[in-house]
Image: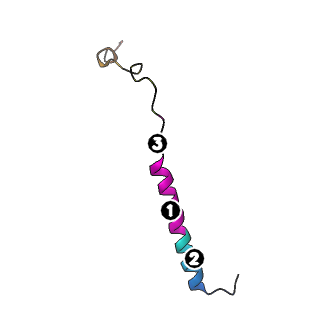
Amino acid sequence: MPQMAPINWLSLFIVFSIAFMIFNMMNYYLFTPPMPKSSIKYNICVKNSMNWKW
């Protein structure tokens, strides 16, 4: 619509940009990744990992 004033284009761009950023931030910060079911299986022994086989 070229008959719209440039200030209207600027205000629409700012409003939709802010809405887009708020929507993306809500989706990013509200997402909770699923936790592993058993955390006992993932125990790593630090003493054994420090043994270097030179």
Query: How far is mark 3 from mark 2, CA to CA?
Result: 32 Å
- Residue contact at pointers 1 and 2, CB within 8 angstroms: no
Q: Which residue is mark 3?
A: 32
Query: How far is mark 3 from mark 1, CA to CA?
Result: 19 Å
Q: Which residue is mark 2?
A: 12
Residue 53: percent from left, percent from top: 36, 12
- Residue contact at pointers 3 and 1, CB within 8 angstroms: no
User: Measuring 30% from the left and 19% from the top, which residue is drawn there?
Assistant: 46
Q: Residue type at mark 1: give it.
A: Met
In the rendered image, the vertical position of residue 24 relative to residue 31, given as above or below: below
Q: Which residue is mark 1?
A: 21
> Disc 3 vs disc 1: which is toward the camera?
3
Q: Tell me where the magenta segment starts and ends, as one range.
A: 17-34
Q: Label 2: few (<14), some or many (≥20) within 10 Å? A: few
User: Measuring 33% from the left and 17% from the top, which residue is drawn there?
Assistant: 45
> Disc 3 vs disc 2: which is toward the camera?
3
Q: Label 3: few (<14), some or many (≥20) within 10 Å? A: few
- Residue contact at pointers 3 and 2, CB within 8 angstroms: no
- First in residue order: circle 1 vs circle 2: 2
Which of the pair 53/10 is nearer the observer? 10
Q: Residue type at mark 3: give it.
A: Thr
Residue 19: percent from left, percent from top: 52, 66
Q: Secondary structure under badge 2?
A: helix
- First in residue order: circle 3 vs circle 2: 2
